[in-house]
Image: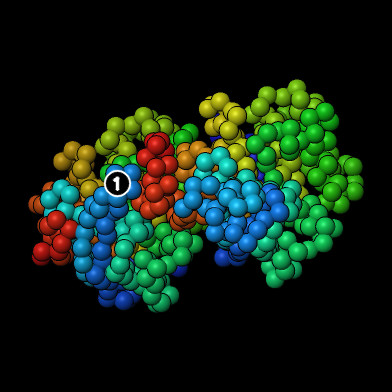
Amino acid sequence: MSVFTPQPITHGAAGQSSATALPLRVRNLHKTFTLHVLGGKHVPAFHDVSFDAPAGGFLGIAGASGSGKSSLLKCIFRTYLADSGSVTWNLTDGSEIDLVQATDDEVLDIRRDEIGYVSQFLRPMPRVTAIDLAARPLVERGMERAEARERIADLFARVRLPRDLWDGLPVLFSGGEQQRVNLVRALAVAPRLLLLDEPTASLSPDLQAEVVTLIGEARDRGTTLVGVMHDTDLLNRLSDQVIVLDQGRRVA
Amino acid sequence: MSAIATLPTEMVRHDHVASRNAEQIALKVENLEAQYGRGCSACHELTGPEHSTNVCGQCGTVIACADVSFAVRAGRTLGIVGESGSGKTTVLRCLYGDLNPAGGTASLMTYEDGRANLFTASAQVRRRVRNFDMGMVYQHARDGLNLRISAGGNVAERLLAAEWRRVDQIRARAGHLLERMEIPRSRMDTPPSAFSGGMQQRVQIARALANGPAVVLLDEMTSGLDVSVQAGVLDLVLELQRTEGVAMVVVSHDLGVIRLLCERTMVMKNGRVVESGLTDQILEDPRHPYTQLLVSSVNA
């Protein structure tokens, strides 16, 4: 049996592929950093990017280093504020919200209930063990701590995180170990949208394969995925559609 | 050692109960203004970040804060960062009634359903709201505690103010809260003057929570503590966030503390808010020159 049983507390959102065909619509998104510390220098991140992410599909974003891929994901998650354009997200209840304009509290609700983000870097919380760190989003959604830890333990086993690390502090882990904690943390809650920034970058090929399987299972449950990867072979294998950025512009 | 194991179960409200309440705005502040001095018609024009001062060049009045607006939901925490003198502590002092604001409004969900302005309420009403619905942790224990009466007495003082009358209940509640703050019952009758800095701050937190407040204000609560002691205090606050469903406002100049405790952050300079947003956005995509300087100065 899959460890990914749909969760009652997510309003049954994940797994229902009857949702709108285009849960995420990005239109004319634009981002430039103005660095006042460097005398007002402008650093363009990306320009006039538009795309749709199909429900329950994997949209890949390809491009060279510095082409704006990661910035684009951060803008969708609102870690970066876009200068103009819109990121329209279809909420579970069928209504729409523009994540560029949404209030902070609305974005926090959506992050808790619907949208996950995984980068290649884990941000450990001081003094919180790996298993509790990964279980936190589940607990925030109302699951009992013991049950949440059990679910995380299943997933840790699948990504072959050594058992003696489960109650260890992730700040002391290797990059690959941290990355697995990060992935498990995001995948466990079965978000409706998952943003993946180089989710397999520091993993060995066999672990990569396991992560690819987990991502595939998430998609089968109805999670929409948007992913950035350097490994074009892997990206093409995973994606239903690939868009390409070059110097901040969409070229394909 | 995790704080969780030491929490008596009856105190732990289930997490998603807290998040269900979370749709409500617990505290709303609009155009808060405070000043030291008589003020003149040019004060507003001549102060603020664009003048790099909060002192009016015409009349010498200090505009400690102006045009400060924000709202905090139940169960969420707002951070206020800024350099010394930016007005962040003033905001807390106005809210808690330690200082009279010159203008603006503050409404509390628990006071007249948020429809009335706390700042224009009578002194008696303000005191009542403070005693029943608010808690405050000061930077210096001497401001928040009576260092000469017992730790338990410090907590009991707040319970008496909130009209608890039965001595046995007061003593039980005080002992329970202190224990939760990892202060053993055997030290309950010791005055905080005999405690370490970290313990004093934990007594302050117990005191701030005594009346079951809707809003807790925390002013640089870990500033004077060494890092390992800070950690213990911060862990307790994190645990409270998960279990109590209170709205918190955390003032700190330590971006590490802000990142750990606050989902949202407001940046102040020279008495004004220069920027506010999600904490990760403020730290990773700061827009105002001052915030960029602040963030680039440290590795939070």
Q: Residue furthest front?
A: B58
Residue B115 x %, y %: 70, 71
Locate residue B49 relative to residue A2 in the image: left or right: right
Q: Quadrant of residue A228?
A: bottom left
Which quarter of the figure is the C terminus of chain A placed in? Answer: bottom left
Q: Which residue is mark 1?
A: A39
Q: How packed is label 1: few (under 14 Cα within 10 Å), some, or many (20 or more)?
A: few
Quadrant occupied by the N terminus of chain A: bottom left
Picture quadrant of residue B39: bottom right
Q: Quadrant of residue A181?
A: top left
User: Which residue occupies the foreground of this view, B45 or B187?
Assistant: B45
**Residue A32, horizontal then vertical, whole percent:** 26, 57
The three-letter amino acid code for the residue at tag 1 is: Gly
Question: Which colour scheme appears in the figure?
Answer: rainbow
Q: Nearer the viewer, residue B96 or B153?
A: B96
SS at mark 1 in the image: loop
Residue at the image point whose x is 39% and y is 49% from the top: B289
Q: Is residue A85 visible?
A: yes
Measured as percent of width and height from the top left, residue B59 is found at 64, 52
Q: Nearer the viewer, residue B253 or B162?
A: B253
- Foreground of the two, A90 or A252: A252
